[in-house]
Image (cartoon, rainbow, N blue to C red):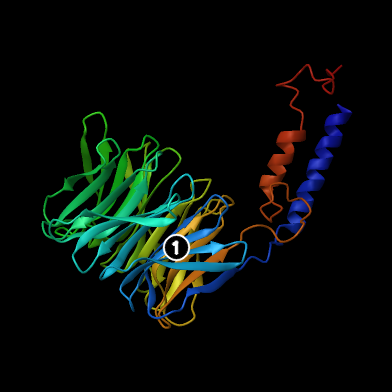
Amino acid sequence: METRKILTICVVAFGLTVWQYAPIVGANTWDIQPVDTAGDVGSSTSVALDDMGNPHISYYDWTNDDLKYAVWNSVTSSWDIETVDSGGNVGAATSLALDGAGNPHISYLDLGNANLKYAAWNSVTSSWDIVTVHSTGNVGYDCSLALDAAGNPRISYYDGTNYDLKYAAWNSVTSSWNIETVDSIGYVGSNTSLELDSAGDPRISYRDITNADLKYAAWNSVTSSWDIETVDSTGAVGIYTSLALDSADSPRISYQGSTGKDLKYAAWNSSTSSWDIETVDSAGSVGFYTSLALDSDDSPHISYSDQTNYDLKCASWNRYTSSWDIETVDSTGSVGDYSSIALDAANNRHISYLDSTNADLKYAFFDASCKFLLVGDLDDNCRADLLDLALLAGHWLIDCNADPGNPACVPKP
């Protein structure tokens, strides 16, 4: 029993250490830099990270009406920038994804012909393979790209001729695109965001323009049909949707409630089989160009534009306080439109966006790793807190009720 007393004293002493050092955190800040300043560039950005955490960004060059692509070169510590497609007025509404080998794939709008296009880097020929996916009518608006486990592209987009939500999937067997209408009830399908679940089935968030609602469509592999539902119908909502799936394949959606110009967030609650909806930020005219990513704990992080102050902002769910931490990322001039967020393996945030004042593509990176060696910080979160105390207890305290055979557990006389 003396052993238990000593261990208890150690834990109490550690608790005092936690109390003493809890206010000390790492000096973490946003690193902001221009990516491309050649002409009027940087709208329609989309960012993705490779396995090394290097950012890749697709975007539109307004000056030359081209689709462009930038990737961080960790060897030269600079951005490698190239034009992907310059055939006419192309490159709006870009959506970027990386395959298993780290090769970039981009869906985008051919504005000149109102067509949906797709570009994929061919590592064999060291060039871009570019194809037109859909050219019937005015199509390709608000496109969103995802790749399945085999690297096959899937694209959701808006059909501006029929006012429908469309979906295109590459069929590797027939070497052709399978195109279908997902929702055609009223004017629907703008502001699309696509994700694939763990089975490779598509999920899409989008706006019902007719009713000004946020909607969600999920492919049902059992019925071979789309399950469609209204997520939020309170006021005029559903602009700038961004979809992410958590570790249980439950959908989360960030979007703007256009009635009050608020940033909103909807999360599927599997326990109640309903949507939990909340307002994240209502301070002014906010919630433009939302982009959502989930960290390793399924906590949401949302980048967006505050058009009252013309700032880039980021809202992150704080699981310790059960509240949103909202911060201004960049406030130099008019910035933050066309934001796109991605998280690396260490949950560091990476955001691409437009600097409207200078017509430049910009990039912001937040390094959340601890910059200091902190006494009592066992889980390396730059805080000595109760989680560290629990970690210590879980590893070192002896539970004699659960483990009566432990040599340290001596029966009472």
Instruction: Relative to 198, say whether 401 is above or below.
Output: above
Instruction: Relative to 141, say whether 31 is above or below.
Output: below
Instruction: Relative to 43, say whether 104 is above or below.
Output: above
Which kind of residue does numbered mark 1 sit on?
Ile
- The residue sitting at 54% across, 73% down in the picture is 33
- Pinpoint residue 112: horizontal percent, then vertical percent: 20, 69
Q: Quadrant of residue 111?
A: bottom left
Toward the viewer: 168 or 13?
Answer: 168
- Pinpoint residue 216: horizontal percent, then vertical percent: 26, 48
Q: Quadrant of residue 303?
A: bottom left
Kindly give the residue lying farthest to the right in the view shown.
Answer: 2
Kindly give the residue lying farthest to the front in the view shown.
Answer: 125
**Secondary element type, mark 1:** strand
Toward the viewer: 384 or 371?
Answer: 371
Quadrant of the image for the N terminus? top right
Quadrant of the image for the C terminus? top right
Q: What is the tally of numbered marks visible in this picture?
A: 1
- The residue sitting at 61% across, 67% down in the picture is 77
- The residue sitting at 45% across, 66% down in the picture is 352
Residue 255 as seen in the image, left or right of residue 297 = left
Toward the viewer: 159 or 192?
Answer: 159
- Pinpoint residue 266: horizontal percent, then vertical percent: 35, 51
Q: Residues within 10 Å of mark 1 (few under 14, many from 20)?
A: many
Toward the viewer: 164 or 104?
Answer: 104
Is residue 325 in sight in this rendering? no
Q: Quadrant of residue 409?
A: top right
Residue 59 as seen in the image, left or right of residue 365 = left
- Pinpoint residue 411: horizontal percent, then vertical percent: 83, 17
Residue wearing tag 1 = 57
- The residue sitting at 43% across, 37% down in the picture is 248
Is residue 245 in sight in this rendering? yes
